[in-house]
Image (tube, rainbow, N blue to C red):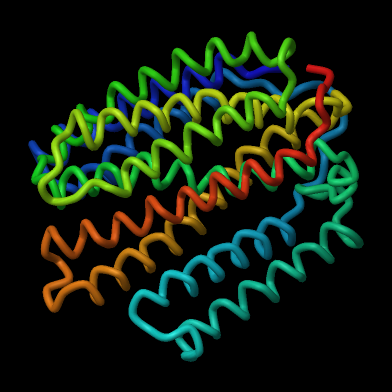
Amino acid sequence: MIPRGACACRGVGGMVGAVAGGVLTTGLSWRWVFLINVPIGASLIAVAVTSLTARPGRREALDLAGAITGTAGLAALIYGVMRTADHAWGSARVLVPVVAGVLLLAIFLVVEKRFATAPMMPLRLFSNRSVAVSNAMLFLFGGIAIAMWFFTSLFMQNVLGYSALDAGLGQTPAAVMFVVVARFAAGWLPKTGVRLLMLAGCACFVAGFGWLSQAGVGSHYVASVLGPTLLVAIGIGLVFPTLMASATADVEPRDAGIIGGLANTASQVGGSMALAVFATAAAARAASHSSNSSSPEALASGYELVFGLAVGVALAIALVSVLLPRRQRS
């Protein structure tokens, strides 16, 4: 099923979050960006407890071993990659968490394959080509989302001198564009098929991030930020709903919930890994550019590298997209 409502909610949520985060950071403190999630989380728990009811039938066993090993493995791996900003890849501070993360993820796969009675990630699902390829692409897509929303915000604040609120407002047109394009893309998908929308979206990524990589200290918002972010937002509007639909197509109804959760997890994990890699690369480029790595010129050089890497990610997504079936049952 094509997730039109989910895409719209994601876009609106991102737009509201960018502006609200800017208001909190500018008016109060950056700490409020995290503190505000406490009452929101508490409210969601209260609503879930009072409003959601379990379906009748046998309750599945909790895959506690899988949850622990999978979460700990990803956390250790991401932490190890992020440590490369301050330490060499061959240092113990990097290798220990990375190796630990890989081992924990290997144990997670063994648990899911052989021991879990109700695995949280049934490996049999990856025998479906649409599921396997789409989740690999969603993992890569996480890097596109991080480069777009996180690093363009940093560019506006640290290079162009915008406040957090101004940066949030500066991203609002792109968020609106994403919502509009995603709404139409959901209707185009049954007619065009997956590959055409994917390639069109990736072309927008390459053009948009290539444009962003040319921005610097003397750049202006309209010419160097608004234009390319609108292009990237068009690409996101084409690619994200297409990938979500592809990841959940041709699956049994009993697996729909697991597949949906797996697709969202792939995107989130990909974004976390990309953030670690991009931040490390940007910091290294800024440090090599100038003795003052926090100067706008040095930071701009680091962000230029990030946007260039995003072009590479977009090309990788386009390459993998040829493995998708041309048409799928929605």
> Viewer-proximal residue, 49 or 180?
180
From the viewer's side, name the closer residue of 176 and 314: 314
Task: Reply above or below: 4 against 292.
Answer: above
Q: Residue at x 72, y 25 (%)?
A: 194
Residue 257 position within the rendered picture, expressed as x and y whole percent measured from the top left: 74, 30
The image shows residue 189 at horizontal and vertical percentages of: 68, 16
Q: Is residue 106 left or right of residue 300?
A: right
Q: Residue at x 74, y 20 (%)?
A: 193
Which residue is found at the position 53% from the left and 21% from the top?
A: 7
Q: Is residue 89 above or below residue 237?
A: below
On screen, residue 1 versus residue 146, left or right, reads: right
Task: Pinpoint residue 187: horizontal percent, then vertical percent.
Answer: 64, 9
Q: Quadrant of the N terminus?
A: top right
- Residue 230 % position (x, y): 35, 26
State which quadrant residue 304 falls in. Answer: bottom left
* Of residues 237 and 164, the one drawn nearer to the viewer in this rendering: 237
| 103, above or below 213, in the image | below
Seen from the viewer's position, the closer of residues 114 and 183 is 183
